[in-house]
Image (spheres, rainbow, N blue to C red):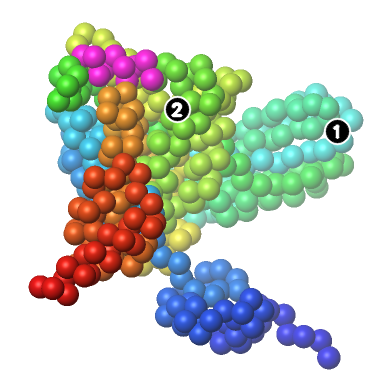
Amino acid sequence: MSQTPFYRLSYADRCQQIAQRVQLTQAQLAAIVAHRQASDEDLIENYLTTYGLPEGVAVNLRVNGRAVTVPMVTEEPSVIAAASNGGRLLTSEAGITTVVDRREVMGQIVFSHVADPTDLQAWLMANQQRLLKVADAAHPSLLSHGGGARSLRVRLLPPNWVSLDLFIDVGEAMGANLVNTLTEAVAAEIKAQRDDDILMSILSNYATHSLVTASCAVPVEQLQTKTIAGADVAQRIAEASDLAQVDPYRAVTHNKGIMNGIDAVVLAMGNDWRAVESGAHAFASRHGQYQGLSKWWVSDGYLHGELKLPLALGFVGGATKVLPLVQVNQQIAQVSSARELMGVTAAVGLAQNVAALRALVTDGIQRGHMSLQRKSLALSVGATPRELPAVVQRLATITQPTTAQAQAALAAVRQANLKE
């Protein structure tokens, strides 16, 4: 008698089977069941529980002359603090300005073992208008929303690959399924006309036709610390930026800081952060070496900053429909289109970057990090919200507190509370 596939088991049976297989305690099993959300069960296969992450908001940000409050989902303590601090540092009349030139997503139709790549290339370009019409016909409703297939490109790849790249305006959607539908329709049309081996038809997450640029210019005086003049801070930020252009080891960490902010917004807005991450890092390598995504320089008494990266974000569709907080978060951020979302997200990345660079070249990154890390450490050893301030205060004099020291601090706080 065949065993029932795991995905066909009832929720209770799945939990019980996992519990028996890995010897979960009753308390562990209860924690899994306690976080169950019935609305999530159809989102993924083999659903077990809902793993939550904290959501907060970045404040002090001014984007295109408008004050914005941006929801961010992250587990790292310092991310939202840094974005808010960066927004404060970059405050000016316009704040951070953003530009989205166009918003198109690319699909690939890949031919393999092509005997004469130049002949195939010539045929594809000669038939491009017909192929674009075939793509549009595969999803007529896209045209009614102002979208549709916009252009084709053919790339010859060694040794004998040919990639037909189809660029599509997907409207307000993320567009992955839509692009896959259109590329498959075009592939079927080509197969009906030619005897070529088509290996695959699929979306590309390297969204070079969905670039957003965030930029700012702030007086250097705004960057001063208690001990360092603003002009000196600005110059040091520019030097740190230059380093990220020549040293990939530094560039990776430079960009990780940018993506701290961007990923947190993308998560809060129900978009695909894995696609955003992979596209951003590919863009950072477009010149043949991995480099920083942002650039900072000093001119005429101002610190100038610019961040450019691909951000193919969607305002509707996908998880934005089924995750209940997404529409709430869109309202909090006051964004009403994919382009606005792209701009706000990039602005957070730029603010995140300047806050990290300023900390690095002045007091060091750990000073700000550790005040927040002490809270996390206190919570990890069981401090309640009421006990948290007192435990953190006891840990404040320790440069790198350990778990044992946090436990001792919590025990001391509880002992003191008993005496009150």
* Amino acid type indicated by mark 1: Val
The numbered dot on residue 293 is 2
Q: Which mark is residue 114?
A: 1
Q: Is residue 24 visible?
A: yes
Q: Quadrant location of residue 155? A: top right
Q: What residue occupies the far right of the structure in this picture?
A: 115
Instruction: Please tell me whether the stretch drawn in magenta is mainly helix, strand or loop.
Output: helix
Q: Residues within 10 Å of mark 1 (few under 14, many from 20)?
A: some
Q: Residue furthest top?
A: 300
Taking 190 as reference, is 330 left or right?
A: left
Question: In the image as oriented, which residue stretches furthest toward the left?
Answer: 420
Image location of residue 215, percent across then percent down = 31, 26
Residues 15 and 274: in front is 15
Query: What SS does tag 2 mark?
Result: loop
Indicate the position of residue 210 as horizontal and vertical percent values: 47, 36
Residue at left offset 26%, top offset 18%: 234
Asked whether residue 344 is drawn in magenta, I would say no
Q: In the rendered structure, find residue 255 and report the number of the disc placed on it.
A: none
